């Protein structure tokens, strides 16, 4: 499932809007995730600031690599392998995606329209598939 040029542009532009809020997006994401799935929280051993920083860096990198996703795949698979060691399971990805999409909706407010939702949803699925490959190996 490839992203169209319009979808890639939407992702870049909406992330630029998110970036104006600094790490607020990461904070909202983890608030949502831990509220939706409190049993996931103990898998995170680092302090919250570090977790949020790493998450934000990953999303930033994913947005920067949206044009060159093939080059990004090995890193995502490695991420999956590391997260498998932390106890991540394939079943978690539905909750993670829901928390992510809710965080986008919250942070982008009126700018998160149907086109944005479709673009991000597709990209999250593409990213998750690579991470799941890493978990599965």
Image (spheres, rainbow, N blue to C red):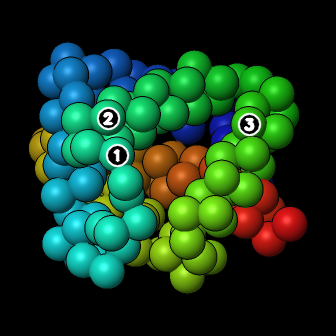
Circle 3: element type:
helix
Q: Which residue in the protein does label 2 denote?
A: 50
Where residue 31 appears, as percent x and y from the top left, is 17, 58
Res. 96 visible in picture: yes
Q: Residue at x 55, y 82 (%)?
A: 91
Where residue 41 appears, as percent x and y from the top left, is 30, 67
Which labelled disc corresponds to residue 120?
none
The Cα–Cα distance between marks 2 and 3, rounded to whole angstroms, is: 19 Å
> In screen coordinates, is 117 left or right of 119?
left
Q: Is residue 38 above or below residue 118?
A: below
Q: Earlier in the sequence, mark 2 or mark 3?
A: 2
The Cα–Cα distance between marks 3 and 1, rounded to whole angstroms, is: 20 Å
Q: Which residue in the protein does label 1 denote?
A: 46
Q: Residue at x 17, y 72 (%)?
A: 35
Question: Between tags 2 and 1, which lies in front?
Answer: 1
Question: Between tags 3 and 1, which lies in front?
Answer: 1
Circle 2: element type:
helix
Q: Residues within 10 Å of mark 2 (few under 14, many from 20)?
A: few
Location of the C terminus by quadrant is bottom right
Location of the N terminus by quadrant is bottom right
The Cα–Cα distance between marks 2 and 1, rounded to whole angstroms, is: 6 Å
Q: Residue at x 41, y 39 (%)?
A: 55
Q: Which residue in the protein does label 3 denote?
A: 75
Q: Pointers 2 and 1 in contact (CB under 8 A)?
A: yes
Question: Between tags 2 and 3, which lies in front?
Answer: 2
Query: Residue 34 occupies which quadrant of the picture?
Result: bottom left
> In screen coordinates, is 27 left or right of 96?
left
Q: Pointers 3 and 1 in contact (CB under 8 A)?
A: no
Circle 1: element type:
loop
Query: Residue 86 occupies which quadrant of the picture?
Result: bottom right
Res. 112 visible in picture: no
């Amino acid at each position: 499932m490839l992203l169209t040029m319009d979808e890639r542009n939407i992702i870049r532009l909406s992330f630029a809007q998110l970036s104006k809020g600094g790490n607020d997006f990461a904070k909202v994401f983890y608030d949502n995730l831990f509220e939706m799935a409190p049993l996931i929280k103990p898998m995170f051993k680092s302090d919250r600031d570090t977790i949020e920083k790493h998450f934000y860096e990953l999303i930033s990198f994913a947005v920067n690599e949206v044009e060159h996703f093939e080059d990004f795949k090995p890193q995502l698979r490695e991420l999956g392998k590391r997260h498998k060691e932390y106890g991540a399971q394939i079943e978690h990805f539905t909750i993670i995606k829901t928390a992510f999409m809710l965080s986008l909706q919250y942070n982008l407010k009126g700018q998160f329209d149907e086109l944005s939702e479709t673009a991000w949803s597709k990209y999250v699925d593409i990213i998750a598939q690579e991470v799941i490959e890493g978990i599965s190996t």
